[in-house]
Amino acid sequence: MRSPKRWPVSAAAWVLLFCASPLPAGVRVLYQVEAAEEISQKTGKPILAIAGTTDCVYCRKMAAELENNDQLEPLASQYVVLKMDTAGSEFPAWSARYECKAGGVPKVYVVRADGKQLLGEAGAPQDMDNFLKHYLQDAGKILEPKELADLEKAARNAQKAMKRKAWADAIEIVAAEPGKGSYAEAAVTLENLAGELVEKGRIALKDAEKKLASKDKFDGALALIEAQRQFEGLAAANELFAAAVAKHNEDAEVAGLIAQAELFANARKLETQRKWPEALEAFQELAAKHADSPGAAQAAKHIADLEKRISVASGKAASAKKGSENAAAPAGADEKRALSFLKMARQFEKKDPAKARAYCEKAAKAAPDSPTAKEAAELLKSLPK
């Protein structure tokens, strides 16, 4: 039987060989603990370590079987195979960390990629096929090369998002749970980032509740709702916010503020997306449903600003090219704006005729020749002066 070939390369070189480049065919036995551990951590593959003396026939036989038996290759390739000399310089540190239940050689160890020991016994397995299958059950998910590459990319992107404090982007990545069940370094990184994000959600919740307990109760309700939506992709964080919202909804005053905050958050999202007519309508809905409320007062500022923006945008577009296809778009926008004003007028028709009259006039001015303007004129006639 041929002697196993030693590979005099550094741990970093082994990692590059096994992880950055296409894997060589078959299984390669390693002889350096550092190299085996680095590859195990990076790939999530468990270490199968064989420790023995230089004259141990069974040690050599076991290593050779793992390296050369083509039938075992699909299973053996899911391990990082390490061979050690019990008289060598690396074994004392290894044996101090990992226990072997019996004396003699070969001493056989299986160590998961996260460092948890799954096996430590003396004697070569009699049925290697079933032995390898058995310990893979507790070794975590072993990723294919493309899966591992995708996972590492996801981890890098999530870390970049965290540095930018783009929590929503980071949450989208980690909530997808790529690599779930794997002990690969990238999977562990994503799991840790998920924990960090849950903690940030906890801090955001604490800040929102602090505001709710102050005189700025609407700001607190809004902070609560917006934080809930920001962190809802994480199950653990979502549970925290759901429980908090349910608790605060038991207070009638706060429940009303939360309802306003939900409408306000929807409107502000549309405004951020530059969907100005839709945002205007959403803010107007808030003002109509919760008149004379903190939410309505906040909405009024946005309504005034959006009306100005829409008016300026419509004016610029209308003067661009009359009769062209481009000129048709502002007319549609004006019609939509007029319809929004008409809806508001109808909402205020009974409880505040003065406001309804003001919105009818705005609808007629927004799109004078439109059917909406005609409806507004009819409604205006029916309103008491």
Image (tube, rainbow, N blue to C red):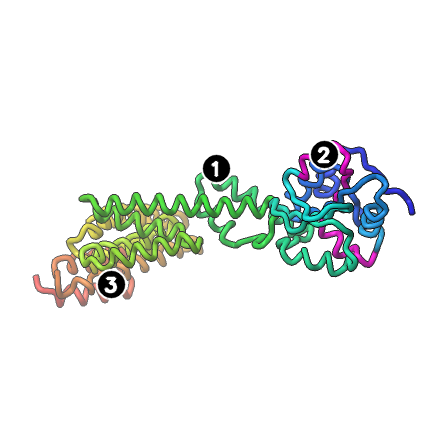
Distance CA(mark 1)–CA(mark 2): 39 Å
Q: Earlier in the sequence, mark 1 or mark 2?
A: 2
Between label 1 and label 3, give the one nearer the viewer.
1
Residues in magenta, as a range = 70-95
Judge left or right: residue 97 versus residue 290: right
Say which quadrant the C terminus sits in.
Answer: bottom left
Please tell me in which quadrant of the rendered image residue 33 appears.
top right
- Nearest to the observer: residue 34 or residue 43: 34
Q: Amino acid at mark 2?
A: Glu
Can you give x and y, in whole percent of width and height, for residue 334 in the image? Answer: 32, 56
Query: Above or below — where is 120 with respect to 344?
Result: above
Residue position for label 2: 90
Judge left or right: residue 106 versus residue 362: right
- Nearest to the observer: residue 199 or residue 347: 199
Residue at 22% in and 54% down: 257
Helix, strand or loop for disc 1: helix
| Dot 1 crowding, Cα within 10 Å, few <14, some 14–19, many 20+ | few
Can you give x and y, in whole percent of width and height, for residue 51 in the image? Answer: 76, 43
Residue position for label 3: 343
Distance CA(mark 3)–CA(mark 2): 79 Å
Residue at 83% in and 37% down: 6
Distance CA(mark 1)–CA(mark 3): 44 Å
Can you give x and y, in whole percent of width and height, for residue 234 in the image? Answer: 44, 53
Residue position for label 1: 163
Q: Amino acid at mark 1?
A: Lys
Is residue 252 shown to the viewer in this render? yes
Residue at 42% in and 47% down: 198
